[in-house]
Image (cartoon, helix red, strand yellow):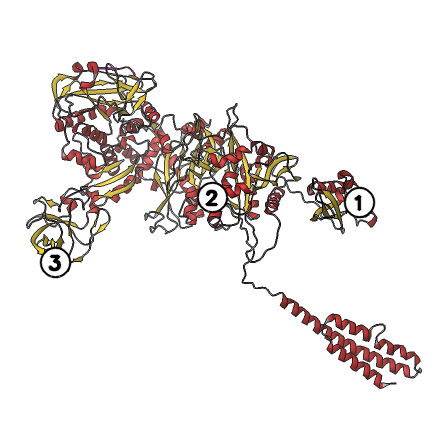
Amino acid sequence: MKISLKWLNEYIDVSNFLSSPHELANRLTHAGLEVEEIQSRRKDYENVLVGEILQKERHPDADRLTVCQVTTGVGIVHQIVCGAKNHNVGDRVALALPGAVLPGNFTIKNSRIRGVDSGGMLCSEKELGLADESEGIIILDRKMALGQPLAEAMGLDDVTFELKVTPNRSDCLSHYGLAREISCLLGVALRTSFRPAKTSNLSTREKMGLDVREVRHCPRYAGAFVSGVKIGESPEWLRSRLNSIGMKSINNVVDVTNFVMMELGQPLHAFDAAFLKDSKIIVELSKNQEKFVTLDGTELTLTGEELVIRDGAKPVALAGVIGSLNSGVREETVDLFIESAYFLPSTVRRTSRKFGIETDSAYRFARGVDPEGVLRALDRACELICEVAGGEIFKDPYDVYPSPFVQEKIVISLSFVEERLGYKIEEELFTTWMKRMGCKVHQDVGSQLFEVVPPPYRVDLALAEDLVEEFGRLNGYENIPEVLPESKGEPQRDQLTFLLEGEVSRLAREMGYAQAINYSFVSATMHEPILQSKESLKRAGLGWEASHPIALRNPLNEDLTEMRLSLLPGLIHNVVHNFRHGNLCGRLFEVGLVVDKPEDQGDYRHFRRLALIAWGNEVGLWSSQGEVPLVFDVKTALGDILKSMGGARLQWNKEGVAPSFLHPGQWSHLKYENRNIGILGKLHPEFSERLKIKTECVVAEINLDLLFVGMPRAVKAAPIGKFPGVERDIAFVVPNTISAGMVQEAIQKAGGKLLRRVDIFDTFKSDDLGNDRRSLAYRLFYQDFEKTMTEDQISALQKEVIDRVCQKFSIAVR
Amino acid sequence: MDENRFEEIRVHAIGAIERTTSSSGLYEVKVSILGKHGKVSELMREMGKLSKEDRPLFGKRVNELKEELEAAFSAKEEQLKRQEWEERVQSEELDLTLPGPKAFRGRLHPVTLVIQEIVSIFQRLGFSVRTGPLIESDDYNFKALNFPEDHPARDMQDTFFIDEHHVLRTHTSPIQIRTMESEKPPLRILAPGMVFRCDSDMSHLPQFHQIEGLWIDEKVSMANLKGTISFFARTFFDQSVKVRFRPSFFPFTEPSAEVDCSCPRCGGQGCRMCGHSGWIEIAGCGLVHPNVLSYCGIDPKKWQGYAFGLGIERMAIIKYNIEDIRLFMENDLRFLEQFRV
């Protein structure tokens, strides 16, 4: 909230801080009331002084300009060229001297205007930021002292603080409340000048009926009748107070209610009594489907849960939140009913949030006003209304307060405070701060315990811990020493998934992939290709149950609306960005969570995923070599990551149709230990063209939850064999329907454990072989760890491999 | 003995050796002179025709010639090989001012790097990592953390709602609750993770990362908290960094504090990053509120604790001088590749 130092000065002497507001701001910030911004109007008018025109002559070279001699004190004369017409010799004027920076960042300098020197500027109201439009320069009151800074002379030297008040400190949401806090912090007495208002002989209670039917939601309701007011413009002092904290002046009565709210923190409401049917106020819950039109004209449908103020016929206010259109103060208003109440904070907050109506009043009620301050504010408002709008205050104001607020005492020992703050505390220091804060402190003779009763406006203080904080904060957090703690407990292991995710990330990095982190939510457009491929992704071990992704109820914008079901939309989006910004090739990976919710049962399920994306070729611009398709690059990277995690038995095979976003001829499922855990493939060229990715782009995604089962796996070093091994090559002529991987698998199976390695080293097609067949050549490496293998043994094994593979696929050796 | 024949062979051979220009040519010459059917072997075979008296001398002369020619061949061979290597390497000359192929630099995201570093620092104090879900129930995200329903403290965090009872977690603090519910004190845990706030501008992302620390033991004080965070700030930023606490409010801690450290960039002198104040806010913290302990079934009379929370992106901004928060989400390689480790 905005705080005016000059206003504050009404209740506590802070005049010294007007020239050094940072000192006060610092003190407040270090007491937990953060001053986020200091605005000093004094600074706006630096080097602008009150001057007097001694002489005025026509500019020798311009009809419209005058050359003035302006003094700012005995013997000091400035020559100023001025373009205005309304000034005369002897006038007091606002003189901006070189160095002044006027609103709009307009810097004043020495200048020469059509050959005549000008040492400053005579300012208009507009140039000083005091009016939107103005004619001529400002002519000041003759009583203003020559040479006085303009800010001081015009009372523009106020300083305002933007104060961040945490939700627990509702007592500081007003000038008087903050003055009370400053009084405690600085040990300076408050100036209290509130006196009871004069009332007439007529009785509020006779004039108006009041029925509070919801005491739980409205623990205290007070009100007074004010008769014969004249609605009009507020006096200058009132308007300027409200202006100083950025509030608009509306009319004298409304201004008073706003002023008192900002003065004492108690929101008030002024009803035009003429509108109150049957001269009656009822405080109760709304009726379901009841209509209510707010004073700004919005029609609401109430639900029966809101607390309303109603007259004999209709609701006239949403309690504590906003008044109705047809009960507020108008120009013709003569009689008023002024309400001052304590509404239950949660009731007000619920209504305010339900309808999205945020008012200064609701803000304060929701945080809790001072239940004991209700009458004082009512009194103050009535008095001020009579002062600025005339009228008379009826006696016997209402005050329905069936169970007065009792501030519970808090029992606390010094050692409790010491133990929590971590330093020794003198008893007197503790009691001094408690008392300065407004608490009553009692200690039985011989007892270690204090009984502390906080003041009623400190609704946030209920536990001994709360007092620990109060003492700590008032005494200064800088007095807390730095001591490393000790623990008797034994350090535990990190959560396994955290370790494994870290391991996967490091492995992906080793493969040359850079880590991306994307939003957990995506746009419907980005999601669409994934959602279309639900069946295929399910077969890949990347499935989900829900028919729709989880939607945010209140998305920020239409790009971030639903929870992702795959990491790919984000990564593809990243490639589009990178490509557009000239990164023509690259490798990215992401490790993250996706979220799903099965329709029938309640729980949200999180799945861990790893995804890779590669685009562009790594070959340099000046050379051309390495024609291995990009999809194999990603396959190698992914395979290597999984093997390094300790995974065994990876198989690449495709079942069913390709996801619609992948190239139907360049994709594969990844099977890990007989279970599909992921997918690999090149983006469908049509899809990447649509995204303007003008290069190959390959993606892969795997289900980390499946991969992590049984991990981490301990490393068990296997022997590597001392005896020499032998290489043998074979080539088969294979129909296109049989994949290289199937043949390799069959070779491995036939070769048994002495066949240590099988590598494919050649594939080719030729006219001789025909269109539907190709040659696949493999290099086999045999090794016995126990002994040197004999030629016979190797030949027998090789023959076994050839026979079994040929038989299995009905193929021949080339 | 025919002196001339020796001399003839010698001259012929030396001449042939000298004229040869390649290793393969030299080999042919060598075969024709010293080979089985070469001129020297022929000479050797003639020895049989000589008298017994002449043989030793003749043999000696042949051997001398053979040795001489072998030496000449070796020398020539050496010379030719050197020459041939030279020619080969010359022909293989490359212009090394040309660039090499593109290297793909694997990198971890700065957010991950900061998390890893923070974890490793707190591991030295015996902390271990816990994680939790992104979608949290209202109970875990708010209620258990002493945010009563319809309490204005809930307005402190702009919340993304999923359904009536679930939100995208607004902080990593629910992980505290989950841990306290499932494990017994004493506890020392760190909880890193993604969090969400319905807020986006030049200095706020709707999704960012926090790391939460929780220490539960029999005696834990604000002094312990200050000691811990001070140790952390000095290790993470710089040994000279100072830490100060400012009173603040969080529903789940009492007392609560916000933590500033002296600006590591300017050493507290004041710069753009610290808003010319010399201090920079790095964390929120406090002693665990007794209501939170009770909610988790931990007796607040027996156990105390502290908790703190750090913004990961904020740490990265300070540490790596990152000027635009959007860089965290764009995943532009020109940005990511700078984070060499």
Q: Chain of mark 1?
A: A
Q: Is residue B101 above or below residue B195?
A: below
Residue type at mark 3? Asp
Which of label 2 and label 1 is nearer to you? 1
Residue A384 colored magenta? no
Q: Quadrant of residue B6?
A: bottom right
Q: Chain of mark 3?
A: A
Crowding at dot 1, Cα within 10 Å, few <14 / some 14-19 / many 20+, comes out as some
Where is mark 2, residue-wise?
A: B111
Viewer-proximal residue, A69 or A20?
A69
User: Can the viewer see residue A32 in this picture?
Assistant: yes
Residue type at mark 2? Val
Residue A366 % position (x, y): 31, 27
Alpha carbon separation for disc pair 3 and 2 = 67 Å
Where is mark 1, residue-wise?
A: A797
- Find numbered disc 3 in the image and state the secondary structure of the residue it sits on: loop
Q: Quadrant of residue B97?
A: bottom right
Where is mark 3, residue-wise?
A: A61
User: Can the viewer see residue B237 in this picture?
Assistant: no
Q: Is residue A411 above or below residue B193?
A: above
Disc 3 + disc 2, Cβ < 8 Å: no
